[in-house]
Amino acid sequence: MTRVPDDPAYPLVAASAGTVDELDGMLVECRACPRLVAWREAVAAAPRASFRGEEYWARPVPGLGDPHAQVLVVGLAPAAHGGNRTGRMFTGDKSGDFLIASLHRAGYASQPTSVRADDGLVLTGLRLTAPVHCAPPDNAPTPDERRTCAPWLTRELRLIQPSVVVALGGFAWQAMLATLGEQGWQVPRPRPRFAHGAEAPLTGPDGQALTLLGSFHVSQQNTFTGRLTPQMLDDVFRRARELSAP
């Protein structure tokens, strides 16, 4: 059966993608979650005053970075006036500023800023993605929306085969454990608990190894209050580099 972008089963086409570029091309057409489609387009129709006159992306936001990355960073979902506006993950908002500056210090990013999709940013050895690829109301995807979007993350993991995944926040941590469990990875019971700096070594169905690292999310709720400092995030990416070294 041919699946169309507004079919709830459309994300299942992800399994047929042979490359990361092909996967991203399929993903940006998706309209499988009516609430998210309505929200992302409503935000674009009523932009903030500071962005008035800009044309918003208002579509699913694909992953960003090295298609052969050893380190995959998993967030939550695009920001309404960040990735949903610029069309690029962690671009055009304070969360992106904080994250990309840390990646630059760690040697993963070519520059310390991520302002717009054509600003020349290059990520090497690392890729950014999310369990949900559309901006959700109140930054809160529903469990059903996470499950509907899951095939994109599943295929991305299989195509990239990272050795380290950095989960930004508890939502990303739980989404990763669920996705890996569905792929046949050996996820301990009880599941490893999320914490900043937490590490969970996991083994895949064919014996492959992956370490899940936890970090507080780079949201302003954490960075403006000092719950997450630049040094704390730098320490996580320093550890990611150590674990992913040949």
Image (cartoon, rainbow, N blue to C red):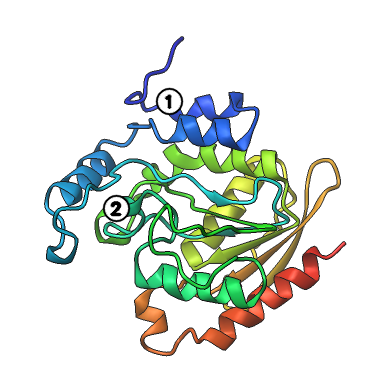
Dot 1 lies on which element? helix
Give the residue at x 43% y 72%.
97
Q: Is residue 2 left or right of residue 53?
A: right
Who comes first in sequence, dot 2 or dot 1? 1
Tell me residue 77's x, y (percent). Answer: 40, 55
Judge the density around disc 2: few (<14), some (14-19), many (≥20) Cα neighbours within 10 Å: many
Mark 2 or mark 1, whichever is nearer to me = 2
**SS state under label 2:** helix
Mark 1 closeness class: few <14, some 14–19, many ≥20 residues within 10 Å: many
User: Which image quadrant is residue 223 in?
Assistant: bottom left
**159 to the left or right of 2:** right
Say which amino acid is labelled 1. Tyr
Q: Which residue is mark 1?
A: 10
- Which residue is located at x 51 percent, y 27 percent? 12
Which amino acid, mark 2? Arg
Task: Say whether residue 193 is visible.
Answer: no
